[in-house]
Amino acid sequence: MSAGKDVVCRMENFRVYYMTFDGPVKAVDGVSMEVYKEETVGLVGESGCGKSTLGSALLKILPRTARMEGRVYLEGEDLIPKSEKEMQKLRGAKISMIFQDPMTSLNPIMKVKDHFIETIKTHKPEVSEDQALEMASKALAEVGISESRLNDYPFQFSGGMRQRMMIALSIVLRPTLVIADEPTTSLDVIVQAQILQLMKEIQSHIRSSMILITHDLGVVAEMAHRIGVMYAGHLVELAPRDTIYYKPLHPYTQALLESVPNTDINDMELSYIDGYPPSLLNIGEGCRFVDRCPKTMKVCRDRTPPDVEIKEDHMVKCWLYADNVGEVERS
Amino acid sequence: MSLKTYIIARILLAIPMVLILLTVVFVIMRVIPGDPVLTLLGGKAPIEVIEAKRHELGLDKPIIAQYGEYLLNLFKGDLGKSLLTERPIFEELRDRLPATVELTIMGFLIALAIGIFWGVEAARRHDTAFDLSARVYSIFIYSVPVFWLGMVFQLVFGVWLKWLPVAGRIPPLMEPDHITGMYLFDALVTANWESAKEALKHLILPSVTLGLIISSVFVRMVRGNVVLSLSQDFVRAARARGIKERAVIYRHALKNAMVPIMTVLGLQLALLFAGAVLTETTFSWPGIGTYLIQKIRYRDFMAVQGAIVIYALIVVTISIVVDVVNAWIDPRIRY
Amino acid sequence: METQVEVRFLSAGIGRVLRKFFRSGSGKMAFVGAVILIVFLLAALFADQIAPYDPTVRSGRTFQPPSSKHIFGTDNLGRDMFSRVLHGAKIALLIAFMAVLIAAAIGIPLGLLSGYIGGPLDRILTLIMDAVYSFPGLILAIAVAAVLGTGVTNIAVSIAVVYAPTYFRVIRNQVASIKSELYVEAARAIGARNWTILFRYVLPNVLPSVVVVLSMNLADAIMTEAGLSFLGLGIAPPTPDWGYDLSNGQRFILMNDWWMIMFPGLAIIVLVLGFSLFSEGLNEYLNPNVGERE
């Protein structure tokens, strides 16, 4: 891996539950992982697997019904006990977010420059308006937008341009961690490629870390140093990109990769995973992939698998690889 | 399009609206079954008197000719003469208008303050007891007749507590120098504190009455639209940039909610004016509303028509102002 | 035998729908509203039987505060306020219903035609109706009432003029959008005639909104009627009427005769509240998506 080993963000047994009248919905359950300096971690999984909840939870911008437990360290500071006021100081400055839909993520009645001025002055009240504008022009230039457009409104931009603006807005204060939640999903294919290229450049330019949330395996293949696979609230496998693509261990990761349509003309058959993910409402112990897994064992139903370190930088949450389980229990 | 061009375009667009409203007034006053002169003079008037009156008012001409004359006179700013006072109706209304405007503006401001505070807070605490209180308040206050609320205030603050006057705008001889005709404003501008105090004391009960009644719609509108606005992506994105909650709520959510709010309020301002007629009557407030009712009692047909025309013009003016304010808030409207 | 089974099935179905309706939050609101309305309706229908005195003639000393003999007190002419409030319900409901029916009778057919036919007719009608709609309702009613004069029918017509555009707008917009729906196109494609389409396909689809608008307008009509009679443009005395009684009571407010204004006012509030709750609940139940913005 090209990136160093300094840890920027560390999650320990991170859980996010949505409280409902019928009980908790365990959207993110027991996720432990680290994000290193200047690296990109891709988080993949089907919709509803908790990857977006995880992203928003890191900024603590979830609905009131969400409860968070565990530990989340950002540069050594635990975010979980932080108050809303303390979080506000971090958001946009230390940790920022790029959203899925650039068409709706900008305030339609605010000029571009006011988005920047507001963000900059919130975090750096000492900065004058002119200095803020200068910072904004610089950030815009970095994403390839002319500063002459500072006086325009978001609706005067195309979708790709707006996503560039969102990116500029998220990096203007040089955050250490950027969370990109499906940043290209709503864009045209050509624009997608441009935006991904841009994000790569920007990231190495400002030397930040990134968590890239997407359902698109092609996107993470392009961007990520390491890939985390999520399924029904669990982080089931986490490994360097090539390991995930060529030597996946978790049955879900294997099935997921098989279901990717392939350009080989002779292989027309598209495989898929039978069944549906479980409901996360009041879900108890056990592996969550158990009903769809071809290698289910008895223990899988009764106990949640541990995070097994196969080797350095390769974690898999599966009983198949746990040494401490006796042969009897496995059969 | 710049805001200035937009304003001009909007005013030009209002011309057909004015014409239609004036025509509606004309139809009501002259064409629908029912004889205004007969109503004016009562059924027992001798036929010659009725005919003479008809001729005097030009009601014996063909309806189309009457219509043309009516529009032409209005265009010239001539609303005719009061049958009772023989004074030009235009002048009489001009003297009365500031009182109505003063009352309506104060009522509007009070309603706006209540509506924004309660509505935004309710939206912020969506589905809590506080939110429920806003909904119950707005349904309940909607059911209260404005004149009844006014009477209860007169009873409580005028008769029982004796804190505030229950009628009129200001004691005689205390009127401030005439600038706008809105006493409170004029008194403040001319630093006439005694008059300002009296004017304010007289203004409190009527404007609070009117404001409370209208606030029902305001609370409801603000709450509903801010709830919708708060669920939008850009609000979440603003939070993700660390924008302070106050700014998120007011600068992002409320400001975006203002456009639909203003659009409906533009129509709802009708409620404000209707309420103002009843409020003026309740508090003997010498505005256009009491003028209208007085003239109906005295069967001063031309003056009634004039007052209604003024209301029609006020309605159109408000709708222009609302659209311009919206275009100012939301530039997408201008483009 | 077969029909009996069907009937039982149908009634069970209606029962289920009603149970579900009244259990939901909006249903509870509608239920409270319905109870209020029924109480007022009964009071109006049986006013003669319930009222202890003739509301139009003197029945005791003047200006009596509430007592066991006159639970709402007496007015300046010694008339029993309780009897007047009871009989007032009759006038209020009568005029409100008449006004709303007249408004619907004008607004609905015009709206159907305008929306269905479209073209210049539609544009002109819409322009006129919008203009009338934008005019302050009470002032419009005052103008019409001033020309027409007093009396139950005249007041009802004055109020109807205010609300006809509401029906027109609701119906017209719905018809215009339903007209292009697939099932109407399909009906046209199989050769259904215009009238058939209008009554078989379009009307049933706009009826739920009509019901909601109707019950909302009843609340507004009660208010407008009270306003008109408060201003002296309503029913001629001595007929008992809440608005008139309020303006009559106001003349003696400085004498602290609170009961003369309190009870007619409360009657208006509770009745309007009944209509509002009922229509609000119904609206949220029938059109769950449109409630928030308006």
Image (tube, helix red, strand yellow):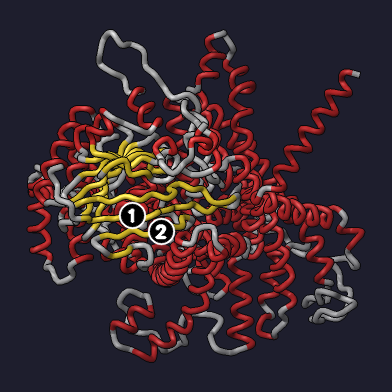
Judging from the image, what secondary structure is the residue with disc 2 in? strand
Residue B305 percent coordinates (x, y): 48, 55
- Residue A161 point in image, percent of width and height: 17, 40
In front: C232, or B216? Answer: B216
Q: Residues within 10 Å of mark 1 (few under 14, many from 20)?
A: many
Callout 2 amino acid: Gly
Foreground: B40 or B120? B120
Q: Which residue is mark 2?
A: A70
Residue closest to the eye, A227 or A115: A227
Name the residue beneath numbered marker 1.
Answer: A11
Q: Residue at x 62, y 65 (%)?
A: B144
Q: Are marks 2 and 1 in contact (CB under 8 Å)?
A: yes
Q: Position of residue A325 (x, y in %)?
A: 47, 41
Mark 2 closeness class: few <14, some 14–19, many ≥20 residues within 10 Å: some
Chain holding disc 1: A
Q: Amino acid at mark 1?
A: Met
Residue pictured at 49% horizontal, 35% vertical: A327
